[in-house]
Image (tube, rainbow, N blue to C red):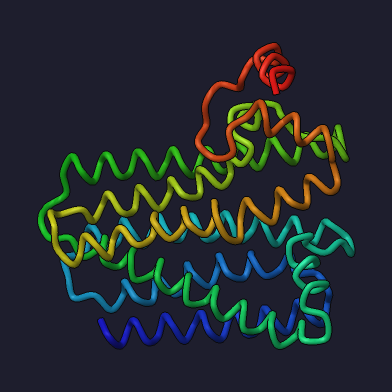
């Protein structure tokens, strides 16, 4: 497994280094996340292929991660290509903050993302390494993963349709009326499903399998997902987005708060 781990790390380090060069030359940093998704998928597959195990569970994990990587990578790259010259607002804000040091700091930032992708690959490989025949646990994990893939695809579809019809407004229809970031929630749920495949008591393999959902939750909710995106939305949408924040949960889907409850709470301040 050591050879596979080093190979997967090399794939991600090289891919994210290339993403830094592409982003600097094109000033379209939307390519970064698409490259990250595809290279994380490739790194995971390279690692799983080196495992000396019965093939059933590794093949399932490899197929699921491949579907995830291709769908997400294609979506992000296509969105960037169709977006004209617009830069990703999160990376644009970082460039402004970094100033003249932006090229060097962007490279270092993306190599940190390579390490994050490598942790996901190691976690998926740990899940694929669980011994024993296929059973109910695998069926449960598959149901979670399929739900996550469909939910993420559907939320991306709803947002794209809303932007075509109501550019410049706040999307609060469908899944976006239950969570401010349903695409992030389902992204996290995918890795929860992969982790469920690998749970096998309190041991090192289970601990490593759990790294992916824990790391993804921390990154999406507290670091590179929700915080910079909501900062941008507040700057560009103002009070409309603040009202949306008061009604709708940030991450976990749940029914929105009724408008009159929000109004009563605000008036009581």
**Front-most of 246 and 163?**
246
Q: Is residue 250 above or below residue 126?
A: above
Position of residue 227 in the picture relative to residue 111 (left or right): right
**Front-most of 111 and 158?**
111
| Identity of the residue drawn at 75% across and 35% down | 242
| Identity of the residue drawn at 58% across and 56% down | 72
Position of residue 175 in the picture relative to residue 11 (left or right): right
Taking the view exactly as shown, the residue that stands out farthest to the left is 132
Q: Quadrant of residue 152?
A: top right
| Identity of the residue drawn at 47% across and 77% down | 115
Taking the view exactly as shown, the residue that stands out farthest to the top is 260
Residue 219 rendering spot, x and y as whole percentages: 52, 59
Q: Which quarter shows the C terminus?
A: top right
Q: Is residue 93 above or below residue 7?
A: above
Q: Is residue 77 above or below residue 167?
A: below
**Front-most of 4 and 33?**
33
Residue 59 rendering spot, x and y as whole percentages: 30, 61
Residue 64 rendering spot, x and y as whole percentages: 40, 54
Q: Which quarter shows the N terminus?
A: bottom left
């Amino acid at each position: 497994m050591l050879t596979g781990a080093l190979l997967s790390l090399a794939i991600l380090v090289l891919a994210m280094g290339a993403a830094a060069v592409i982003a600097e030359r094109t000033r379209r940093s939307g390519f970064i996340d698409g490259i990250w998704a595809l290279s994380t998928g490739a790194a995971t597959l390279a690692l799983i292929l080196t495992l000396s195990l019965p093939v059933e569970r590794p093949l399932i994990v490899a197929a699921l991660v491949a579907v995830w990587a291709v769908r997400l990578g294609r979506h992000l790259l296509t969105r960037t290509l169709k977006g004209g010259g617009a830069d990703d607002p999160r990376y644009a804000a970082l460039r402004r903050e970094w100033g003249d040091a932006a090229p060097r700091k962007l490279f270092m930032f993306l190599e940190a993302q390579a390490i994050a992708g490598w942790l996901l690959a190691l976690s998926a490989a740990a899940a694929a390494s669980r011994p024993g025949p296929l059973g109910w646990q695998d069926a449960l994990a598959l149901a979670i993963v399929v739900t996550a893939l469909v939910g993420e695809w559907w939320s991306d579809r709803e947002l794209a349709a809303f932007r075509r019809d109501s550019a410049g407004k706040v999307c609060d229809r469908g899944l976006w009326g239950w969570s401010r970031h349903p695409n992030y929630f389902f992204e996290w749920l995918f890795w929860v499903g992969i982790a469920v495949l690998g749970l096998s008591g309190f041991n090192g393999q289970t601990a490593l399998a759990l790294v992916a959902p824990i790391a993804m939750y921390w990154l999406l909710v507290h670091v590179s997902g929700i915080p910079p995106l909501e900062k941008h939305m507040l700057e560009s949408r103002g009070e409309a987005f603040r009202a949306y924040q008061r009604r709708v949960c940030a991450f976990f889907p749940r029914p929105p708060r009724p408008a009159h409850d929000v109004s009563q709470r605000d008036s009581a301040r």
